[in-house]
Image (cartoon, coloured by chain):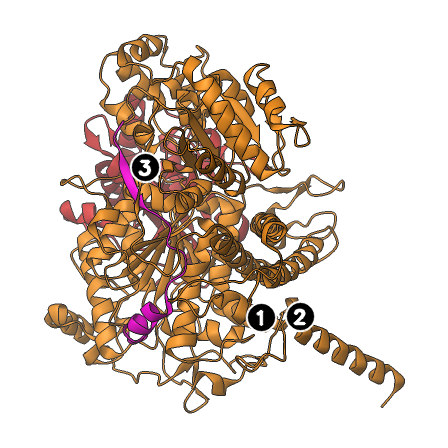
Amino acid sequence: MKPYWDVNILTGTKTARIIEDPVQFAGLIKKATRPLYILGPDTVDRKIGDKLFLKYCLDLAKAGNLPICATAHVQKKMEEFGVQPNSSYDIIEIVNHLKDPEWQGVNKEGNHDLIVFSGVRCDLAERGLATLKHFAPHLKTMALCRFSHPNADFALPVIRKDEKWQEYFASLIANLIGDR
Amino acid sequence: MSKKNKAETLNIITNQVDTLNIIKGEDTWEPVGPTPLPQLPDLRNWSMRLLKTYKPFYAPFCDLCCNCTYGKCDLTSGKKGACGIDIATHQARWVLMQCCMGLACHGAHGRHLIDHLIEKYGEDYKIDLGMQVDVEAPIIRTVMGLKPETLGDLRTAVEYVERGLIHLVSSTHTGQEGNNLDFENKALHAGMLDHVALELTDIAQIVGYGYPTSIADTPLVELGWGAIDKTKPVVLAIGHNAASVNSMIDYLRDNDLEDKVEVCGICCTAHDVARYSDKAKIVGHLGKQLFFIRCGIADVVMTDEQCVRPDVPEEARKAGAALIATSDKISYGLEDVTEKEIDEIVRLVSEEKRQVLILNPEKAGAVAAKVAVVLAPNRKKGFIDTEAAIELAKDCIACDLCSQACPNMLSIGKAIKQFAANDIAMLSETFKRCFTCGKCEQKCPQSIPIVKIMQAVATKERYNVRSGRGPIHDVEIRQVGSPIVLGTIPGIVAFVGCSNYPKGDEEVADMMDEFARRKYIVCASGCAAMAAGMVKDKEGKTIWEKFPPGFEAGGVLNVGSCVANSHIVGAAIKVANIFAKLPGRANYECIADYIINRVGACGVAWGAYSQKALAIGTGCNRWGIPVVLGPHSAKYRRLYLSRKEEDDWNIMDGRTEKMTEEYVEPAPEHLAIVIESKERAMVSIAKYCIRRNDTPVGRQIKLNHYIALHKKYIGEGLPDDLHLFIRKPTDVPMFFKREVMEYLKEIDWKPRQQVGLPTLINTYPTKANIADIK
């Protein structure tokens, strides 16, 4: 499937599996042993309807008990909501760590096996996902982004309407609550 | 001695003699260091030592290799190409090719200018950079061992670059180099040669055209499309090589027309013509090229080389402007009329509307001036008015294909739709972030002229930028050398490169302002210098009016066009060579070692887009200068990153010549990194100015900024890596003392010794002499 942004069109052979069903998406997260949720600055710059994108992401992290890596200046906004990230790296730095299977992860319990991206600037996220696709075969990547990301292992279809995007998040959260 | 060994020895001696002849080995200004005219193997160990700490990080743009007829080859999941190459090596090769393109541009630019100026003035024409600059060419001296005294010597330098470039390009052929680290060594070498090319080019134009030198307080130049007087005939120069537009200035002066013809420029040629004529104006950075041509204000568009859009002839024709191409590097398929008489060319261009190629700068300049005078009275110029623009926008069907095509991922469709409803705010903000590439229009099924509509929301204000000043003065280096090395001037931050900004010009201006207020030395060049000038504060002042123009704490200076970036690197070299009296001649490794350990410099190429910017940045990396890149630059596909807590940071203490046994701070932490937001970048830049040699007072000052910026932009607490940069309690900034000491206690931090003379020399096999750094 073509991503929303032309700049992210894949020139390649290995493309994401599109997960249309949030229940299935939640299932993939639940199966992970040590997931990591990476939140980029679009979470602070964009809204879904009237609500800040970050709020949805924090609700999701809470529901799924996902450790958070805040990139860019996301931590500042998280603190306003009374939440501390588990780590704060910029996107390239966290990707660089994730490449190493021996890295101990943000909780010092071993490297992560599933990386979920939200709100990272789309063209930069795509490059980070490409790095992980080629150089981190020990983990899987998911792009929880309405603009779709072909270099992830699992991605969403392009979701144009805010209502659909809200519905996807709501279902995802509902299917994660209490399971981790 | 065997016959073979004897022959080899003779060869070596012959080569040495040749080398010494080239660099005038008999000169006694300094003894020749260990690496005169270095070739690839000579500094390979230095590269490998850097790459041991700062490992290449690759972000492939494509899963495939399409380089040869074996392909396309799928390189995913550990697969190799039919030639045997793997994905990492392929990325490294790609980066080298890109660096070679950048190097070739600067080298060929320099070659053209030097040949032109030698033809004009002769090869013995003296290099004189004024009373304040004795060390005229710190890069050429350090890399080559040559002290250039004449234009002919600069030609020697460009020949060295050309020879190296052929070698580098050859290694990118299929079936040549097969290791990513060796490709990286070659990319670093290309970057180093690129800096030689930058320096020789700017020196040539300074001496050849009499650009400002040995003066800090250069004039303010009018900036912005709103500053261009469209009531006059207007000539727009685009590119980087000002030979032709400067010749036009000569023509205007000779014919008493300088006040009657408006000369303006886009991109670096604008900086350079403004260094030549105080009447020339700067339209803006390269990102506004299509926008300005389409405004139709220019009567004549004159292109030279680099960063010029391939569709300029088509766009100029649509705008009713004449086009004169002046470089054989950008000939556009046009007829070469160089041999024709000036008046005949003027007739062809103004009456027959022919677009032409003129390869003689003097002739091109005269023709451009004359054509502008002829054409201007009959042309209607001006921006579209808001009402007309709104009418055009009303054709929008909200398909949003324009947004999808935008390389900067702007919501253009929504902005156009709102504009059609008479709400201009969003389109106005969108324009600030737009580099007017026109891709949105290509996708529009309604053929809405989006770039033209943007004229209605573009500010018409006049801004300013300080004219490029050229080299940093030796006396300035003597004044700030000590505080830089001790750390009491917290750093030199250089904002350079192109205008591919994620969020517009304001970001560069904001960052420069933040660091200038914190008393860093803030340098700028090229499009970054222009972008910074396109923003005014509440009092209506640009950054160029707010801060002093000297190389001093809190100074904000514009060195000039992108070839003038050499002077920023040159300043770091001069700190080693002039302030610390480190032998510089052909002593690359010692000087670079000094810079990486003691000179807190950090480059910021927030909008880098070009291959030239990659070459410049990679050259900085070989000198040990870290470079922060904006998010678009992940598309360069390679960075140099460390991992501060996992990697081996042990170095040598030059005084004892023993390896350190304790953890040494990861400074600088990375050599080339992409950072996602301006806020994060500012915190990181402050950190990347920390050096191992900082005194406790200097470290306190640097950490004070690091913590303060972290609290301002990232979070209330302390940076989670702060402890790595604190050697002793005396490093802790007074302002945050209580909080930091509590944190250190909480994590069971232990003090450690400051390394007396931190160095990488002798931590790897090298011909460099450790005694030089003592």
Task: Say what amino acid the circle numbered 1 marks.
Answer: Leu
Front residue of B59 and B317: B317
Residues at marks 2 and 1, CA–CA distance in whole angstroms: 8 Å
Say if residue B437 shows up in the picture.
Answer: yes
The residue carrying mark 3 is B223
Looking at the image, is mark 3 or mark 1 earlier in the sequence? 1
Label 2 in the same subunit as label 1:
yes
Label 2 in the same subunit as label 3:
yes
Residues at marks 3 and 1, CA–CA distance in whole angstroms: 38 Å
Determine the chain carrying the residue at label 2: B
In the figure, the shade used to draw chain B is orange
Query: Disc 3 vs disc 1: Cβ atoms closer than 8 Å?
Result: no
On the image, the x and y values in percent for residue B14 come to: 76, 77
In the image: residue B542, left or right of residue B356:
left
* In magenta segment, residue B219: no
Please tell me which residue is depicted at 32% across the width and 17% down the height of the picture.
B416
Determine the chain carrying the residue at label 1: B
Q: Quadrant of residue B167?
A: bottom right
Count of labels shown? 3
Disc number placed over residue B146 in the picture, else none: 1
Residues at marks 2 and 3, CA–CA distance in whole angstroms: 43 Å
On the image, the x and y values in percent for residue B762 come to: 52, 83
Disc number placed over residue B22 in the picture, else none: 2
Task: Say what amino acid the circle numbered 2 marks.
Answer: Ile
Determine the chain carrying the residue at label 3: B
Front residue of B510 and B224: B224
Query: Disc 2 vs disc 1: Cβ atoms closer than 8 Å?
Result: yes
User: What are the residue bounds of the magenta stretch?
Assistant: B460-486
Indicate whether B501 appears above or below B407: below
In the figure, the shade used to draw chain A is red
